[in-house]
Amino acid sequence: MALTAISLLCFADSLNLFYAQKSLFLTGQQEQIPINVTATNKFANTKVPYPTAVTVGMPIFGVLNKLKDTNNSFTFTYSINKSFGIYLESVNGLAGSTENHTYWELLSKKGNSITRLNVGIGCYQPKKNENFIMNFTTWD
Ligand SMILES: *[C@@H]1O[C@H](CO)[C@@H](O)[C@H](O)[C@H]1NC(C)=O
Ligand SMILES: *[C@@H]1O[C@H](CO)[C@@H](O)[C@H](O)[C@H]1NC(C)=O
Ligand SMILES: *[C@@H]1O[C@H](CO)[C@@H](O)[C@H](O)[C@H]1NC(C)=O
Ligand SMILES: *[C@@H]1O[C@H](CO)[C@@H](O)[C@H](O)[C@H]1NC(C)=O
Ligand SMILES: *[C@@H]1O[C@H](CO)[C@@H](O)[C@H](O)[C@H]1NC(C)=O
């Protein structure tokens, strides 16, 4: 089920990446934007924000790798689905499971509005000041 959350919007988003790369070419510098990456788990009652700054156009996959490389308290694992791309498997040692019907739901909070992402971590490019939320949850 979790994988159905990943769709084809990658193509629309690569247009943004194109513009980001174009502006990089024109200005010669990589614009950094502040975002938060948050890991929430209602069952364990935890909510850990990781404030960071990332290059415009960088997909979440790159953001998570950067966090992992710079903060010992953050780790994640992923798998590659040949059709759907990079799939987030675990965060800070906790993995979703088919047996328990659990997975890491991907959400984006901008201002007070929260939306559920319909693309995976390999595609999604966070915007300035957004809070990218990885929410450990269950499916029916
Ligand atoms: C990729 O994801 C689809 C959709 O969930 C699933 O049907 C398929 O078995 C997966 N493929 C692999 C190799 O995991
Ligand atoms: C990240 O979250 C912290 C704590 O909630 C907040 O103070 C900060 O403004 C947030 N940063 C961004 C870029 O949203
Ligand atoms: C790692 O992230 C945690 C949670 O946001 C934070 O308290 C800690 O200061 C960070 N460590 C480093 C080295 O940035
Ligand atoms: C399923 O949930 C139980 C209870 O939280 C846990 O002990 C077990 O490791 C989980 N199974 C998997 C495959 O994650
Ligand atoms: C995260 O998952 C919990 C448990 O399923 C759910 O109650 C909560 O609404 C989710 N958080 C967000 C921001 O959707």
Image: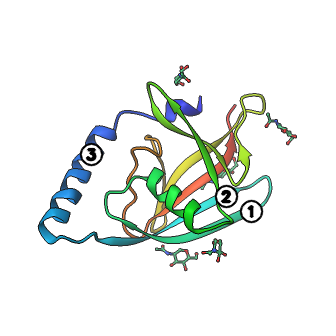
Assess disc 1: are there few (<14), some (14-19) or many (≥20) residues with their C-alpha within 10 Å of its C-alpha: few
**Dot placed on the residue nearer the N-terminal end, 1 or 3:** 3
Please state the horizontal and vertical placement of residue 139, each as a whole percent of the image.
67, 35
- Number of numbered tags placed on the structure image: 3
Image position of 118 (left or right of 45): left
Residue to which mark 3 is pinned? 14
Image position of 55 (left or right of 24): right
Residue drawn 23% across the image and 59% down it: 20
Disc 2 under 8 Å from ligand 5? The reply is yes
Residue to which mark 2 is pinned? 40
Task: Name the residue type under label 1.
Answer: Thr
Check if mark 1's residue and mark 2's residue have beta carbons within 8 Å. yes
Task: Name the residue type under label 2.
Answer: Thr
Q: Is residue 90 above or below residue 109?
A: above
Q: Is residue 51 above or below residue 103?
A: below
Please state the horizontal and vertical placement of residue 122, each as a whole percent of the image.
43, 44
Q: Nearer the viewer, mark 1 or mark 3?
A: 3
Which of the 4 quarters of the picture holds residue 42? bottom right
Kindly state the secondary structure of the residue where label 3 is placed.
helix
Task: Name the residue type under label 3.
Answer: Ser
Which of the 4 quarters of the picture holds residue 49? bottom right
Check if mark 1's residue and mark 3's residue have beta carbons within 8 Å. no
Kindly state the secondary structure of the residue where label 1 is placed.
strand
Q: Which mark is residue 46?
A: 1
Closer-to-camera residue (72/6) = 72
The quadrant in which the C terminus is found is top right
Please state the horizontal and vertical placement of residue 54, each as a whole percent of the image.
40, 67
C-alpha distance separating marks 1 and 2: 6 Å
**Dot placed on the residue nearer the N-terminal end, 3 or 2:** 3
Check if mark 3's residue and mark 2's residue have beta carbons within 8 Å. no
